[in-house]
């Protein structure tokens, strides 16, 4: 994902097309900066989404975190399948 600017308009599209765990983390961090949100735990985007929901945080950031958690699971599953073959 080199040389791509993450904006609030393209963040979800970038997450959906990303096939790299590092890129997913980078996108989430950039959106957090853009929305002035704080990520409390880098190991679980779902935990962060639940926390932001609880404190009535930025709704777009919550959506990005949930999608990131879903994409991370997909990428990990694809990688596991690839290693088996």
Image (spheres, grey):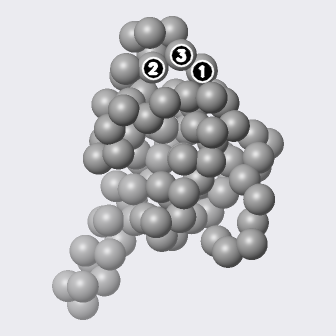
Q: CA distance from mark 2 to mark 3?
A: 5 Å
Which residue is at a point 47% across and 47% down the rendered structure image?
68
Q: Looking at the image, is 63 positioned above or below residue 17? A: above
Horizontal side of residue 4 vs 14, given as left or right: right
Q: Which of the 4 image quarters holds residue 41?
A: top left
Horizontal side of residue 76 vs 12, given as left or right: left
Residue 23: assigned label: none
Residue 22: image x %, image y %?
Answer: 46, 66
Task: For label 1, count other residues whose C-alpha is less than 10 Å away and answer few (under 14), some (14-19) or many (20+).
Answer: few
Cβ atoms at labels 2 and 3 below 8 Å apart: yes
The residue that disc 2 covers is 52
Q: CA distance from mark 2 to mark 1?
A: 8 Å
Horizontal side of residue 82 vs 8, given as left or right: left
Residue 51: image x %, image y %?
Answer: 37, 20
Q: Which of the 4 image quarters holds residue 31?
A: top right
Residue 6: image x %, image y %?
Answer: 72, 53
Cβ atoms at labels 1 and 3 below 8 Å apart: yes
The residue that disc 3 covers is 57
Which residue is at a point 38% across and 40% down the rendered structure image?
45
Which image quarter is the N terminus in? bottom right
Which residue is at a point 54% across and 47% down the rendered structure image?
29
Q: CA distance from mark 1 to mark 3?
A: 6 Å
Q: Which of the 4 image quarters holds residue 69?
A: top left
The residue that disc 1 covers is 59
């Amino acid at each position: 994902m080199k040389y791509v600017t993450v904006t609030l308009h393209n963040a979800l599209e970038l997450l959906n097309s990303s096939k790299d765990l590092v890129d997913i983390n980078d996108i989430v961090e950039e959106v957090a900066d853009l929305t002035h949100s704080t990520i409390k735990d880098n190991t679980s985007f779902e935990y962060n989404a639940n926390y932001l929901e609880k404190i009535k945080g930025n709704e777009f950031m919550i959506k990005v975190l949930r999608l990131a958690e879903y994409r991370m699971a997909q990428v990990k599953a694809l990688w596991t399948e690839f290693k088996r073959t």
